Amino acid sequence: MGLPAIEITAVDRRPASPHRALWHGPWGTLLLVGHARWLTAAVFQGPPPGRPGTAHPLPAPWGGRRRLRLALHGTAFQMQVWRALAELRAGEPVSYSELAARIGRPGAARAVASAVAANPVPVLLPCHRVIRRNGQIGQYIGGASRKRDLLAHERIERSNPHVRERP
């Protein structure tokens, strides 16, 4: 979805976040919370929009910088899972058990699912790309229909070579 490289910093507690901005996209609207250098949270605002149409570039709330900086508060295990989320490729869903194996914890699919569900920055850390092993969508903080739409939008975007991130 045109995201830059993601830098994740673990913090002992959630930092004060005086800045807020709305980011509108095919998933609906996200309230981004952070300060001048770091984003600390993203919260869906309102219901998901209708079905996705054609692919289009997304406006970048990070001002076109090549690195998106996140300051996140979580356990060491959650941070490990969230870093693995940052490495997932757009349009290529993985199962919870596959994600567990990627972090070297093949028997921890349920714990991975809990960490994915606790993701404080949906869309930015693409927890929507994690699905059940049987191919079912599963649950999502923004609702199952929004998760389906995000995955569909990414498949459209990946298949259209003319769609590029805005500078």
Image: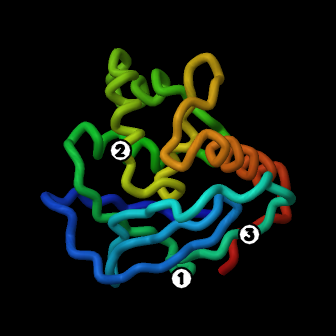
Q: Position of residue 66 (x, y in %)?
A: 51, 72
Amino acid type shown at disc 3? Pro
Q: Which mark is residue 63?
A: 1
- For label 2, the crowd category at 10 Å Cα-Cα, with few meaning under 14, some 14 to 19 and many 20 or more, is some
Task: Identify which residue, 23 or 124, lies in the foreground.
Answer: 23
Residue found at x 39% / y 48%: 119
Residue found at x 33% / y 59%: 8
Amino acid type shown at disc 1? Gly
Report the residue marked by disc 2. Answer: 118
Q: Which mark is residue 34?
A: none
Report the residue marked by disc 3. Answer: 57
| Label 3 SS | loop
Q: Is residue 9 above or below residue 74?
A: below
In terms of sequence position, does the residue under pointer 3 or pointer 1 come before the other?
3
In terms of sequence position, does the residue under pointer 3 or pointer 2 come before the other?
3
Q: Position of residue 19 (x, y in %)?
A: 36, 82
